[in-house]
């Protein structure tokens, strides 16, 4: 349950992680759309995750989750 006043916004703990994921996802999409080229440090956690995704895609084993599975709605 969310409560709003002119000076504050209150949210239940149970809703926080879902909303945080949604906001982070939207912000990353906006950021990615602005970048023409990406430089990711080899060996970084992001590098490892992306290369694992690429390998799964090439092997035909990549499974993308639906919006409902990720955000619970």
Image: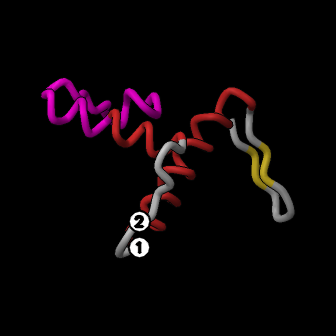
Residue under label 2, please give it. 38
Residue 26, placed above or below residue 12 = below
Mark 1 Cα shell of 10 Å, populated few (<14), some (14-19), many (≥20): few
Q: Are marks 1 and 2 in contact (CB under 8 Å)?
A: yes
Q: Residue at x 24, y 33 (%)?
A: 55
Give the number of the mark in front: 1 or 2.
Answer: 2
Whether residue 2 appears in magenta in the rendering, the answer is no
Residue 32, placed above or below residue 13 = below
Residue 67, percent from left and from top: 36, 37
Q: Which residues are magenta?
A: 53-73
Which residue occupies the foreground of this view, 60 or 51? 51
Residue 70, percent from left and from top: 43, 32
Per the rendering, the mark at residue 35 is 1
Picture quadrant where residue 60 is located: top left
Q: Is residue 47 left or right of residue 6?
A: left
User: Label 1, label 2: how many angstroms apart (C-alpha)?
Assistant: 7 Å
């Amino acid at each position: 349950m969310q409560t709003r006043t002119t000076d504050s916004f209150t949210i239940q703990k149970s809703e926080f992680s879902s909303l945080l994921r949604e906001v982070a996802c939207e912000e990353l999409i906006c950021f990615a759309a602005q970048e023409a080229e990406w430089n990711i440090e080899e060996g970084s956690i992001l590098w490892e995750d992306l290369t694992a995704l690429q390998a799964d895609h090439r092997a035909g084993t990549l499974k993308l989750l639906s919006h409902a599975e990720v955000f619970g709605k």
